Image (tube, rainbow, N blue to C red):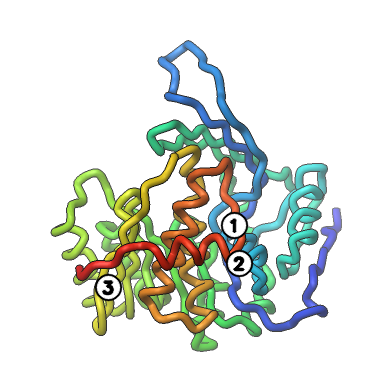
Amino acid sequence: MPSRITNINRAKNPKVDVVCVGMVTPAEVYVVEKMPDWNTGTNWNHRADFISDDAAIVACCITNWGLSGGLVCNKLGDDLAGNNVFDELESMGVMGRFIKDKSLRTPYEIVISDSEGGRTYFWDRREDLLRTLEEADTDTIKNAKCVYADWYDYPYNRPAIQEAVDQGLPVLINIEDQYADSNLISELVGLATWFQCTPDQTSNAHKKYETCEELLRLGVEGVLFTGSEDGCIWKSDRESFSVLAPSINLVDANGAGAVLSAGFLYGYTQGFDMEYSCRFAVSAASKQCELVSPMALPVEEVEKLARELKVRDF
């Protein structure tokens, strides 16, 4: 069966501030007080529909903040769910070449988020969908200022990332807690300008410092180490500091890391220095955690909190 192609907003604005590379899927989040015991149930306090995964979240945030965001992604099924995702992206103004294929079934993701910041994911990352990411149209990257990608879409996202590298564009790759995977890191270090990391269960300040040092030694220009209530750490050969997170009323931490990525890249494309880019990133992620589902709050609200955040040497 033939595929249907949707070209979104490319002609209106060929220049793209941030292009995000990764899988896209419709999703819903349920917020509970705590996860129930086995073979029992519990009430949910909040729920919301949103577009996942992280690359899509970053692209949507960038666009909602008034910049141009692009998305290089997998195909979706030519079905109701796929149509809804692409219609929503079109209404937001996200740019890209999106393809619906009658031979595919649109995936779906369910997230359970608890009051302590824990998240449990039920996803549908099928091989037939991931392989379509390898074939995704990369024309949007030709007009980009920078590119975002995730480790968990690798190697399917490699062709698009390589396109960015070949054009000399800066690339932020979110490796989360995979920095101990030497095989993966050896593959990604030649593609990334910056790495974004999250702590594992054994991380402390000393281990974070050592991790940043090792990743810099391997060849990336900078490391953004995030840590929920700890804010974030930035380390490069030129500077290192940490931005402390504010006190918040936690509702839903789902997607906070992606919102932080978007905030960092927003700052970069706006010409902010690294300290204020990280301030903006931590502010955006913190304010998102007080809401249900990942979203970008108005720039003015994010900037107000960003100016108040404390920074210290790392």
State which quarter of the image contains the C terminus. Answer: bottom left
Of 7 and 92, which appears nearest the observer? 92
Tell which circle, 1 or 2, labels the residue nearer the N-terminal end.
2
127 displayed left or right of 89: left
The label shown at residue 296 is: 1
Binning the other alpha carbons within 10 Å of mark 2 as few (below 14), some (14 to 19) or many (20 upward) gives: many
Q: Secondary structure at mark 2?
A: helix
Tell me how many marks there are.
3
- Residue located farthest toward the top when viewing the structure as drawn: 40
Question: What's the residue type where badge 1 is placed?
Answer: Ala
Quote the CA–CA distance across marks 1 and 3.
25 Å
The label shown at residue 51 is: none
Question: What's the residue type where badge 2 is placed?
Answer: Ile
Tell which circle, 1 or 3, labels the residue nearer the N-terminal end.
3
Taking the spot 57% from the left edge, 49% from the top edge, the residue there is 294
| Dots 1, 3 in contact, CB < 8 A | no
The label shown at residue 235 is: 3
| Dots 1, 2 in contact, CB < 8 A | yes
122 displayed left or right of 216: right
Is 258 drawn above or below residue 47 in the view shown?
below
* Residue on which the image places disc 2: 62
